[in-house]
Image (spheres, rainbow, N blue to C red):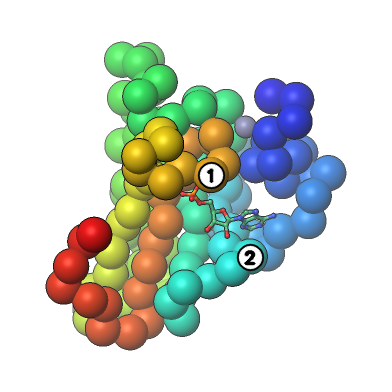
Amino acid sequence: MENCIFCKIINGEIPSNKVYEDDDILAFKDINPVTPVHILIIPKKHINSLNDIEPEDEKIIGKIFLKIKQIAKEQGIAENGYRIVNNCGEDGGQEVQHLHFHLLGGKKLGTKIV
Ligand code: AMP
Ligand code: ZN
């Protein structure tokens, strides 16, 4: 989608520090990490937010979570644990309107979600 920063990362217009890529998924390091490991996992298909997923996206969402499990292991944070965050919409604090999941880990996270 035009003017979507993550679509531009997918098509190479904007550089990124890629961690994983296949036909459906891209994972790259967050430009402003809040934890020692902070990776964004996105579908290559432009989906605005979690509010916009459809039954046809069931497979890609499942694939993303299986990939998150693998990336966490590769990053060495699987055993100690990690957090997956999806910010949805204005109240959820979503800044980039392309569905993404934050993989946060590498330190003991706070116990509060908000
Ligand atoms: P959210 O608030 O959930 O929409 O998060 C958007 C995230 O995208 C933030 O953590 C930003 O640091 C990150 N971000 C924005 N632009 C880039 C970029 N060019 N490369 C990597 N991460 C980015
Ligand atoms: Zn996009």
Element at label 1:
loop
Residue at 33% in and 53% down: 85
Q: Quadrant of ligand 2?
A: top right
Q: Is residue 99 above or below residue 39?
A: above
Judged from this view, the residue extending furthest toward the right is 13
Q: List x then y, in percent, for residue 70.
A: 37, 61
Q: Is residue 107 above or below residue 72?
A: below
Amino acid residing under circle 1: Glu
- Give the crowd class for mark 2: few <14, some 14-19, many >=20 residues within 10 Å: few
Q: In this view of the protein, can residue 63 be seen by the observer?
A: no
Residue at 26% in and 77% down: 109
Residue at 75% in and 25% down: 2
The quadrant holding residue 88 is top left
Q: In this view of the protein, can residue 110 be seen by the observer?
A: yes
Amino acid residing under circle 2: Ile
Which mark is drawn over residue 84? none
Residue at 63% in and 65% down: 31
Query: Is the residue marked 1 within 8 Å of ligand 1, measured from its CB?
Result: yes
Q: Nearer the viewer, residue 56 or 7?
A: 7
Q: Is residue 90 left or right of residue 48?
A: left
The quadrant holding residue 18 is bottom right
Nearest to viewer (mark 2 / mark 1): 1
Q: Pointers 2 and 1 in contact (CB under 8 A)? A: no
Give the residue pinned by disc 2: 31
Query: Is the residue marked 2 within 8 Å of ligand 1, measured from its CB?
Result: yes
Which mark is drawn over residue 95? 1
Element at label 2:
loop
Q: List x then y, in percent, for residue 112.
A: 18, 67
Q: Is residue 18 left or right of residue 49?
A: right
